[in-house]
Image: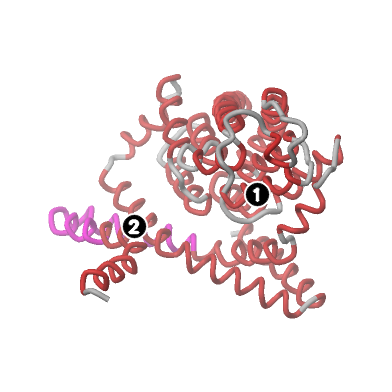
């Protein structure tokens, strides 16, 4: 709750400062905000529905073993899932939060979130169109390895 | 327009809601078979939805503000031929102040390369755009906690520098061409 309040306070200050400097730009920014919300709303409703359905169908213990396992293979698996899926952060974070509440460990969650953000198998053709195949392979491959290292390090620090 | 085309257009309109409709059908089916579980599913969804509805308005306002006050042209101008630590710092700052998905960063990084910025800086921009966007960090703190968020940031930033250094080191440039065309073999036809 405190976090929400702080977030509202920060964005209120930002809007105020923005409005004092440029009324038009502020209106434009709020229009952008509304449009991005409008665009993501349908899939968000769907994901929220899915979370509820999946969490009631799959017992907490099963979920716990799926993401709670700290062995190398299951971590590689969730990292690979993160690399090939394309979920906007705004939807992925509540999903990850629900997994943590079901007993998921820090390492698999960190691995999943990091590959989800930094590795894009689906967008790789587009990336290589812009920067070439070698750049794309290097950036995505190294990011995948880095995600595993980051996850392991987080397991040590937060474990 | 043919009736088939109109039907197609209608289906296009419904498409974003496909998942929602499917889960509602699933909820209903579950409710018929096991009323208790069906209710639980709906209640869980509703509580997540409430949480999202509470946290989202300020997040989207921040996204809108960033998009309007930090337009892509400013990004390009600032990280342009910048070099060394200053270029790195600017790449990190502009990447994290960005809004939108990673593929939105591709044209930005490409125009940077065209203006002579290093492969290193372009890669840093892409990676920070992907992994440390400010509005998304807010979501992360909210749902995974500030300890998780800070630890991830602390390990991810050095990792991004290392990744970008390696990408820069092993992506040959073809001198004489400008911009992204300097990236070596493997580059496919530009648009």
Q: Residues within 10 Å of mark 2 (few under 14, many from 20)?
A: many
Q: Tell me the CA gap for discs 2 and 1.
A: 26 Å
Give the vertical position of B88 relative to B43 (above or below): above
Where is residue A8 shown, x and y percent of the image?
65, 66
Q: Would you name the residue on which mark 2 appears?
A: A49
Taking the view exactly as shown, the residue that stands out farthest to the front is B176
> Is residue B37 found inside the magenta-colored segment of the image?
yes
- Looking at the rendered image, the quarter that the N terminus of chain B falls into is bottom left
Label 2 secondary element? helix
Is residue B99 in view from this perspective?
A: yes
Res B133 label: 1
Where is residue A75 shown, x and y percent of the image?
45, 26
Q: Name the residue located 60 percent from the left edge and 61 percent from the top edge.
A: B59
Along the line of sight, which residue is nearer the eye, A67 or A125? A125
* Figure label count: 2
Is residue A159 in view from this perspective?
A: no
The magenta-colored residue range is B24-52
């Amino acid at each position: 709750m405190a976090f929400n309040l702080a977030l509202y306070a920060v964005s209120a200050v930002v809007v105020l400062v923005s409005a004092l400097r440029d009324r038009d730009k502020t209106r434009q920014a709020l229009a952008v905000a509304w449009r991005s919300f409008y665009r993501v709303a349908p899939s968000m409703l769907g994901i929220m529905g899915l979370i509820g359905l999946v969490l009631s169908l799959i017992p907490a213990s099963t979920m716990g073993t799926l993401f709670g396992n700290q062995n190398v293979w299951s971590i590689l698996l969730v990292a690979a899932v993160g690399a090939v899926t394309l979920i906007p952060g705004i939807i992925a974070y509540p999903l990850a939060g629900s997994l943590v509440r079901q007993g998921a460990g820090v390492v698999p969650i960190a691995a999943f979130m990091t590959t989800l953000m930094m590795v894009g198998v689906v967008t790789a053709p587009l990336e290589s169109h812009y920067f070439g195949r070698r750049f794309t392979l290097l950036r995505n491959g190294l990011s995948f390895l880095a995600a595993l290292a980051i996850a392991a390090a987080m397991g040590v620090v937060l474990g | 327009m043919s009736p088939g085309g109109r039907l197609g257009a209608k289906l296009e309109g419904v498409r974003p809601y496909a998942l929602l409709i499917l889960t509602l059908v699933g909820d209903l089916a579950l409710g018929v078979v096991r009323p208790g579980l069906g209710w639980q599913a709906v209640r869980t969804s509703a509580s997540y939805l409430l949480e999202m509805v509470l946290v989202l308005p300020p997040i989207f306002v921040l996204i809108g503000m960033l998009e309007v006050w930090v337009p892509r042209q400013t990004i390009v101008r600032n990280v342009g031929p910048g070099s060394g630590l200053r270029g790195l710092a600017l790449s990190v700052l502009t990447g994290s102040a960005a809004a939108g998905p990673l593929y939105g960063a591709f044209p930005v990084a490409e125009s940077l390369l065209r203006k002579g910025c290093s492969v290193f800086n372009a890669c840093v921009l892409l990676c920070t755009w992907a992994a440390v966007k400010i509005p998304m960090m807010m979501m992360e703190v909210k749902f995974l906690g500030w300890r998780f968020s800070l630890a991830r940031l602390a390990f991810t930033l050095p990792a991004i520098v290392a990744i970008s250094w390696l990408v820069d080191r092993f992506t040959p440039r073809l001198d004489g061409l400008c911009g992204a065309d300097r990236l070596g073999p493997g580059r496919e036809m530009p648009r």
